[in-house]
Amino acid sequence: MAVTAPARTSLAVLPTPLVTASRLADALGLTEPLLVKRDDLTGFAVAGNKARQLELLVAEAEEQDADVVVTGGSTGSNFVAAAAAAAAYAGMGCVVVLAGDAVNRTDHPNLAAATAWGAQVRWTGNADRASVDEMIPAVAAQLARDGARPYVIPRGGASATGALGYRLAVDELVGQLAGRTPTIVIAVGAGGTLAGLVAGVVAHGNPLRIIGASVSRPVDEVAGRVLALAREVARRRGEKEPQPSDVELVDARGPGHGVASPAGAAAAALALRYAGLVLDPVYTAKALAALPAAVADGPALFWHTGGLLDAVAALMGPL
């Protein structure tokens, strides 16, 4: 069945490079080749992998004649900053709901970027990230009552529309691999990126194994979220729906979400020294640290999702 191409607002510079990192493979103790998919180089407002998701999300907002994007997260959220930039680019306003409060907040380059790019901030007054999910709809409803036309994006862009960006990324990657079949390892937070990849690999007949390194939530919790999103993406495209066995995860949280791990710090140091890759301590460093154990044999592919401003924040130390 022919699939209609979804509407996209051009943000990312695609395709992103697929490179070989031989010296890094040796440093990690791998015996097979290591490829790196450089989605840190999407080219839009240091958004990294978020640019792929936002191409679909912004296009949907435009189709709905929205004039303000409403999303949220933590002060260090990569997605919040990227969404603010994308909304500004599309000529829309942006309101972001952040966990915590203005008085006791921890400043972060992502928060500075989001506000510099025009985002208005609403604080939940509660440090629990779940408080953001509860408050986003309320903020959107108030904006609508005030005459605005809000478009709501869940934390991390983890909707079927956002995940579709990574369903399309699989088409790109399969072409670049030209028949090679490495095992893919990628950091997983809200789950939208992995969901899109799972949907894409299943649609292509499962030529690749994907392992998500969960850095934010327990594996059992994120697996259900990923499967539900992946199935919704497949249904939208009329493609084969993924099964539970298609979602594979390892626990890479270490000391906890948002807290650097010794293993991640060591992996980030190796990545910089041997491949010139800048990894952030919250997502990509932990995912790379998990790769050698996750890929016991055979070639591997590390999908670099970005997180540059998180890496900058780590270098700056406590603010």
Image (cartoon, rainbow, N blue to C red):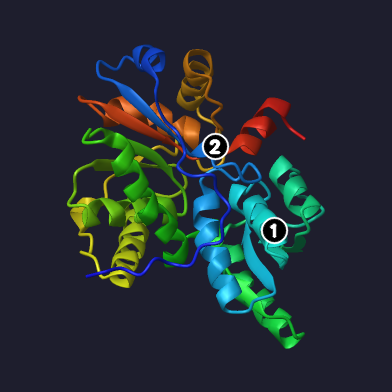
Callout 1: SS: helix
Query: x, y percentage for residue 310?
Result: 63, 37
Q: Around disc 2, counting alpha carbons within 10 Å, would you say few (fewer than 14), some (14 to 19), or many (20 or more)? A: many
The residue nearer to you, when weighing 40 against 246, is 40
Callout 2: SS: helix
Determine if residue 7 is in view: yes
The residue nearer to you, when weighing 293 against 240, is 240
Query: x, y percentage for residue 231?
Result: 29, 65
Q: Which mark is residue 89?
A: 1
Indicate left or right for 280 with 235 as reference. right
Indicate left or right for 314 with 159 as reference. right
- Residue occupying the point 30% across, 42% down: 175
Query: x, y percentage for residue 191?
Result: 42, 54
Determine if residue 124 is in view: no
> Which amino acid lies under the numbered mark 2 shown in the image of this protein?
Leu
Quarter occupied by residue 118: bottom right
Per the image, the residue denoted by label 2 is 41
Query: Could you tell which of marks 1 and 2 lies nearer the N-terminus?
Result: 2
Q: Around disc 1, counting alpha carbons within 10 Å, would you say few (fewer than 14), some (14 to 19), or many (20 or more)? A: some
CA–CA distance in space, label 1 to label 2: 18 Å
Query: x, y percentage for residue 48?
Result: 55, 43
Vertical comparison of 230 with 246: above or below: below
Indicate left or right for 30 with 156 as reference. left
Quarter occupied by residue 19: top left
Q: Which mark is residue 308?
A: none
> Which amino acid lies under the numbered mark 1 shown in the image of this protein?
Tyr
